[in-house]
Amino acid sequence: MLNEYTNLIAEFGIGGAHPGGLSFSKEILTNENIDSNDIILEVGCGTGQTTAYLALNGHTVVPIDSHPKMVEKANNRFQQLYLPCKAQIADIHDLPFEKDSFDIVIAESVLSFTNLDQSLANIHDVLKEGGKLIALEMTKKDSIKDEFLGSIKKHFGTPQILSKSMWENKLKKHGYDPIRFQTMSLHDLPTPEQDIAPSDMIDDKYYELMFKHEKIVRKSRNMLSLGVIVAQK
């Protein structure tokens, strides 16, 4: 999962890099009415923005990320806010948890970067019976051209970008039922609020990559949607 795009996010310490940012995450999580007793796993926690929000609201959250710099910056955030949670380096393809450990698993713009068969199966294993996967994921529209889809996949370093029906089929294959899947236009989402924790020294190549990233995000607004997934074990 480590690639130049994730290195870019880590170097600039961007919180809420997914479309809609934290304000949209808050809306989704509030609508799910998460119980105060639920134990939550956040995979790909990044700099810890969503975990911090949940922890500040009294939830028990276990945050993990495979990028060491993300984990470092997440733990700095938690320390500054005097939160009890601690991020750890862990890979979604090899989750270091017992089966049936969590009531909720949150993945924000993470699954598309993984081997989906492996990651969805592993998440299913660590969820308790009746537990939920809540995910926000890039979802391609039928109108997208193959050439542009290829350039998006190359930029983000993703092995796949799925359509709504492809996502649903993958989830069903790994035993999730019922599945709720809503697609949101990228034009309708709030602009993510600025939340950055840049590294002291950032290579010039990441400034160039950021410029390219902003360009491709603008171009993709009509070609991609944000998939809001709530899938139960």
Image (spheres, rainbow, N blue to C red):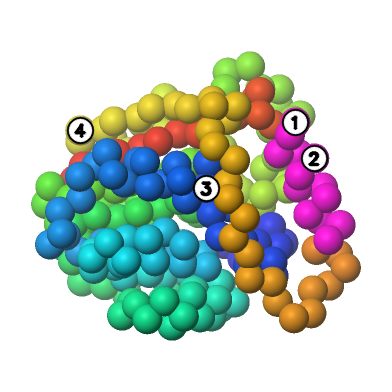
Asked whether the residues under the numbered discs 1 and 3 touch, taking CB atoms below 8 Å apart as contact, a structural biologist would say no
Q: Nearer the viewer, mark 2 or mark 4?
A: 2
Q: Residues within 10 Å of mark 1 (few under 14, many from 20)?
A: few
Amino acid bearing label 4: Pro
Q: Secondary structure at mark 3?
A: helix
* Residues rendered magenta in the picture: 207-219
Tag 2 residue: 215
Amino acid on which disc 1 is placed: Lys
* Residue position marked by numbered label 3 in the rendering: 21
Between the residue at mark 2 and the residue at mark 4, the CA separation in whole angstroms equals 37 Å
How far apart are labels 1 and 2 at the CA level?
A: 6 Å
Residue at coordinates 46% horizontally, 67% vertically from top-left? 48
Circle 2 Cα neighbour tier, 10 Å, few/some/many (<14 / 14–19 / ≥20): few
Mark 1–mark 2 CB contact (< 8 Å): yes
Q: Position of residue 66 (x, y in %)?
A: 51, 71
Residue located at (23% from left, 65% from top): 58
Residue of label 1: 219
Q: For mark 4, does the 10 Å Cα neighbourhood hold few (<14), some (14 to 19), or many (20 or more) residues?
A: some
Would you name the residue on which mark 4 appears?
178
Evaluate if marks 1 and 4 touch, with contact meaning CB atoms under 8 Å apart: no
Amino acid identity at mark 2: Lys
Residue 204 sits in quarter: bottom right
Q: Residue at x 59, y 77 (%)?
A: 69
Q: CA distance from mark 1 to mark 3?
A: 19 Å
For mark 2, give the secondary structure: helix
Task: Choose between 114 and 84: the one closer to the eye.
Answer: 84
Marks 4 and 2: in contact by CB < 8 Å? no
* In front: label 2 or label 3: 3
Q: Which numbered disc, 3 or 4, marks the residue closer to the eye?
A: 3
Is 199 rendered above or below residue 167? below
Q: Nearer the viewer, mark 1 or mark 3?
A: 3
